[in-house]
Image (cartoon, coloured by chain):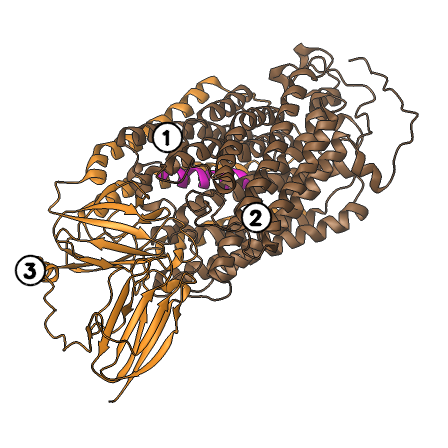
Amino acid sequence: MASIALPRSEARTPSGVMAWLTTVDHKKIGIMYLYTTFFFFLVGGIFALLMRTQLAVGNNNFLAAQTYNEIMTLHGTTMIFLWIIPVFSGFGNYFVPLMIGARDMAFPRINAFSFWLIPLGGLTMYAGLLTKTGAAAAGWTGYVPLTEKAYAAGLGQDLWILGLHILGISSIMGAINFLVTIQNMRAPGMTWFRLPLFVWAIEITAALTLLATPFLAGVQGMVLMDRQLGTHFFNHGADPLLYQFIFWFYSHPAVYIMILPAMGIVSEILPVFSRKPIFGYRAMAFSMAAIGVLGFMVFAHHMFTTGLPLALQEFFMATTAIIAVPSGVKVLNWLATLWGGSIKYTTAMLFAVGFILMFLMGGVDGVVTASLAVDYQLHATYWVVSHIHYVLFGGSVFGVFGAIFFWFPKITGRYLNETLGKLQFWLQLVGFNITFMPMHFLGLEGMPRRIASWTANRTDWAPWNLLATIGAFMIATAVLIFLINFAISVRGGRRAPADPWEGNTLEWATTSPPPAYNFDTIPPIRSGRPVRDLRRGVTTAAEHA
Amino acid sequence: MSRPGGRYTVVSVKPRRLLLGMLLALGVVAALAPLPAAAVDVSPLNCAGPNACDIVSIYTGIFWLAMAVLVIVGGLLAYAALRFRRKDDREPAQIHGNPRLEILWTAIPVVILAFLFIRTTLRIDYVRNGPPPQQTIQVTGIQWAWLFKYPNGKTATTKLTIPAGQVIRLHITSRDVLHSFWVPRLGGQIYAKPGFSNDGWIEASQPGQYFGQCNELCGLGHWFMLLEVDAVTPAAYTAFLSGVPPPGAGPPLADKVTGAPAAVSVNETDDLKFQPSSATLKVGDVVQWTNTGIAIHNVTFDNQQVPSSDTQNGGDKFELKFNKPGTYHYVCTFHVSVGMQGTITVTGG
């Protein structure tokens, strides 16, 4: 609780661009994460628009098949590894130390290193586009033997693997940093069950990242050795399913790496704008932990059509059904948080409520495919494309925008424009559903994903594909509105005070933006809502309600 | 914060209308979804055999249960989101949770999911393994076409002929990368793995054409790795296997020959091209196709009265002597999606 005098360096402190390039401050690193990952979001979005333009009508020649396959691969890889996963590292970097009452992350230099690997990894991957044979074109899953030298001779696939390795190193180091920070640097009084749920989410996400990412790195390393050193992990009669087992042992937990932090964000936004504590705090924390553990036990549900023995399929159908339970518990607790509240619809709150609705949709349509028989038909169709986007766009990305509107005043000291924000939200919500709802119908009409073009004689696919393309451009317009909003607000937005929303958690106890050392004095922590306690003048643990 | 009749009311109506409008639109779209009739129908819901129809009945039960969850929980969420908007500056009751509710809404999903598990498990052996087969056919996926081999050794590409009303067991494998065999109206997807065989089964209740395509990304021509199942009467199937031409077919427009001096030589290259891709010759001349690379190819004419080649490995040759003037277009069915095609123009003698 006592304020710690920071050692003042007499050495020359860099300024301007050099200050950013050399910084080890968690807030500056967090901001750089956010800028960089948002840039990749825009790039991945452009890839998506190209794909939707190609698929708007049947037998289209807008993109050649090879180009489409490359863009489709880069869209998936960008959105997952360069946007959703690291953007949460950005928010985590900025807000975990503030929320637990710490001055910085545990390892500031490693933190900076983790960040700088992100653009490096991304550019390594994109460098494939400059080679004569093009970028990787085997999908973000990179299944063997399609990624073996015999079928993907070009350098693009190697660059893709190296890019993933670089990003993997960044993830693993970031995860260790978060775990050590949350374990050791909590302010006095910040017990585990007073931790904000966002911090819980980052803790569990970091544990998943630390345990799972080495499997991705390992399996891609094996492919790379097959390609460059002539090993035979996945060729010469090896069972290609070995790759898939290892790959999904990472990549299924990775889905939770991509959604848990957004769940944490929503669990922060809802209480603030409904003026109620989160309903079932411990149930929320435990359900995230349960998702984290079960997340390692469902991975083969991506492989139901590969010919696994029925007993194994049954096991994974059961675990897949079970993991839906904690997800359902979370939705119902959010519902109960809203119930009886006093809800104020800021843009952040709109995105948070939008998140719950879209996540519900993505949860329900996902559970349908947990049934083995149904999955035999819907696996790898547009139904699954729809499902993953309801969870990762309607869920995670709506959560990210909620977080941006919620925390922008803290980071910049200014509000984003609420009118533009609400316009963006509604356009994005409508555009999102116009894009991805029809994909359910496409799946039910037998349209496979990952096809570079669709044969026009499948006439019943035509209206839904056209609608999805229109929706995609609506989403793009919404994002454009956000960019305008950002450009206006970052310099000219209304000034925000330290605690603009009547917040609950410690980041609202310091100035907006916070000073380099975060807090003059760290406020006393007597409950899960220390800033609310401060506002109400609560001085003992017994008083907080 | 806001007064009745003030700006608050104006703002508050809008989201509700938008939300209701959106739900309504989604409902309409959902109701229309199965309606449009397709020129080529590959909808798994429009099942045409016992395997696919069993899946539809499992799906239907789970679908309505899922819809019920969506409507109830989504409805409660929408209700709470609209009903509990801020009306004054008072802080609402601070409720931190309710253990009984937590247990209740942990138990309810368990029951629902148990239904999904049991409903699927009861039928999964039938869906996956099927009744004892009456025919067994080898299926091989190759970049980018399907190769079928019947019990008597007869082969075909792209089009699989089966007898209607019979259980067909498929031994599915691949010669190169992963593929996935899928004819949605007859059954679910089965992986084609290089070096391994997966078993699946299909049955078409009625004669007819059923379409599908590869559903595992397999490279450049993946999107065009199409597939057709022709279900015919058992008698027609027997005739098909024995190679008797279907009634109504005219005399062949060209004859297979071997060793005759060739007027035109066409190379099948690893660049996935016929070289030259067009050639002109006279009636009675012989054309020789040679696979000069490693990739496999074939020569398949649009006009079924011109004989087509078997699958050609590197070095294999195929020769035809043309009997009638005309223009004959042909493709390599493996690489048609990347434009591997050619034309032979035969002029009068």
Which SS class for mark 1?
helix
Amino acid type shown at disc 1: Ala
Q: Label 2: few (<14), some or many (≥20) within 10 Å?
A: some
Q: CA distance from mark 3 to mark 1?
A: 46 Å
Amino acid type of the residue tagged 2 in the rendering: Pro
- Residue A318 percent coordinates (x, y): 34, 28
| Image colour assigned to chain A | brown
Q: Are marks 3 and 1 in contact (CB under 8 Å)?
A: no
In terms of depth relative to the viewer, which is nearer, B149 or A45? B149
Q: A152 or B304: which is nearer to us?
A: A152
Which residue does the numbered mark 1 point to in the structure image? Answer: A321
Q: Is residue A359 magenta?
A: yes
Closer to the observer: label 2 or label 1? 1
Q: Is residue A98 above or below residue B198?
A: above
Parent chain of label 2: B
Query: Which mark, by number, is residue B235?
Result: 3
Real-space Cα distance between discs 2 and 1?
A: 34 Å
Q: Nearer the viewer, mark 3 or mark 1?
A: 3
Upstream in the sequence, badge 2 or badge 3? 2
Marks 2 and 1: same chain?
no
**What crowding class fits label 1: few (fewer than 14 Cα within 10 Å), some (14-19), or many (20 or more)?**
many
> Badge 2 is on which residue?
B15
The hue in which chain B appears in the rendered picture of the protein: orange
